[in-house]
Image (tube, rainbow, N blue to C red):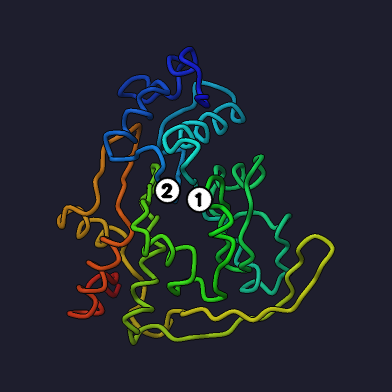
Amino acid sequence: MPFISENEKNRLFSRTEKGEHKVSDLQNALYMLGIRQGDTICVHSQIYSLGIPGMSRTKYLNTLLNVLKEAVGSDGTVIMPAFSYSFCENEVFDVQNSKSTVGLLTEFFRNSEGVSRTVHPIFSFCVWGRRKEEFMDISTDAFSMDSVYGKMIRNNDKMILLGADKGYTIYYLAEESVGVSHRFYKNFSGVVRDGERESTLTVPYYVRHLNKRSEEDPQKVSAYLLEQGIEKSVPFGWGTISVFPCRSMYESIVSKLKEDETHFLKEKT
């Protein structure tokens, strides 16, 4: 059973100075970028880059989710970041109630039917679909091979940047794997509330040395992946939609970091 009817595919989805986009235009863009039935996708989004919605906010967000679900089908899995950074802010991480701080679509997804959230007080993810339970079983290290990103790398799942130009958080896993000198491990502790149960948890985070050149430049990462033919991108609305396979991205970035660990960092200002 499709998530979107034929009538819905022809409704106005968004508009820009370049024209109007239909739901079917977004579906076609995802297919062109290689998204198929049964895929596992992680979506980083910046939805205002897609244009001005031609429908109410709730209907617009629901339409976006339905397009993504339909693209991977009932055998697929949709993942979105729901980062709260709770422990970094000395806050309790409430699995059910701590809001996602990384975009409107991610918070809407978090509250959607059939979606579960991982128990990580800094880098949590929300998951819908066939592999949901697999992604609930993760390490306290958000950038280990037993993390959500690690599992996606092992399976060569796909990352979608939906209008976003800063969706390369998986890049940190490559930096941690290489052991770059501009980062170091720091432990964060606090309280996790899951329903009526509370527990104390300590998680490691490979943080940046703030007194060193250490911040990555997403434009450098994107340019490198496009040059290597790993990332594919199409213009859409006021921005772009990009897709890359996680294992290919990881292996290529690791190889480059071993040559020069500063290659993807922002220049000093």
Is 196 or 258 nearer to us in this picture? 196
Q: Is 265 above or below relative to 31?
A: below
| Percent x, y of residue 63 | 52, 29
| Percent x, y of residue 126 | 58, 53
Packing grade of label 1 (10 A; few <14, some 14-19, many >=20) is many
Residue 179 sits in quarter? bottom left
Element under disc 2: strand
Is 195 or 92 nearer to us in this picture? 195
Element under disc 1: strand
Quadrant of the image containing the C terminus: bottom left
Looking at this rendering, what residue extends furthest in the top direction?
A: 7
Residue 92 sits in quarter? bottom right
**Residue at figure coordinates x 38%, y 42% from the top left:** 163
On residue 264, the disc is none
Q: Is 49 above or below relative to 265?
A: above
- Tell me the residue that label 1 is attached to: 79
Sequence order check, earlier mark of 1 and 2? 2
**Residue at figure coordinates x 59%, y 56% from the top left:** 133
Question: CB under 8 Å between callouts 1 and 2?
Answer: yes
Q: Is 241 above or below relative to 178?
A: above
**Residue at figure coordinates x 33%, y 20% from the top left:** 19
| Percent x, y of residue 140 | 57, 75
> In the image, 263: left or right of 145?
left
Residue 225 sits in quarter? bottom left
| Percent x, y of residue 212 | 36, 84
CA separation in Å, label 1 and label 2: 6 Å
The amino acid pointed to by label 1 is Ile
The amino acid pointed to by label 2 is Ile
> In the image, 167: left or right of 102?
left
- Tell me the residue that label 2 is attached to: 41
**Residue at figure coordinates x 58%, y 66% from the top left:** 137
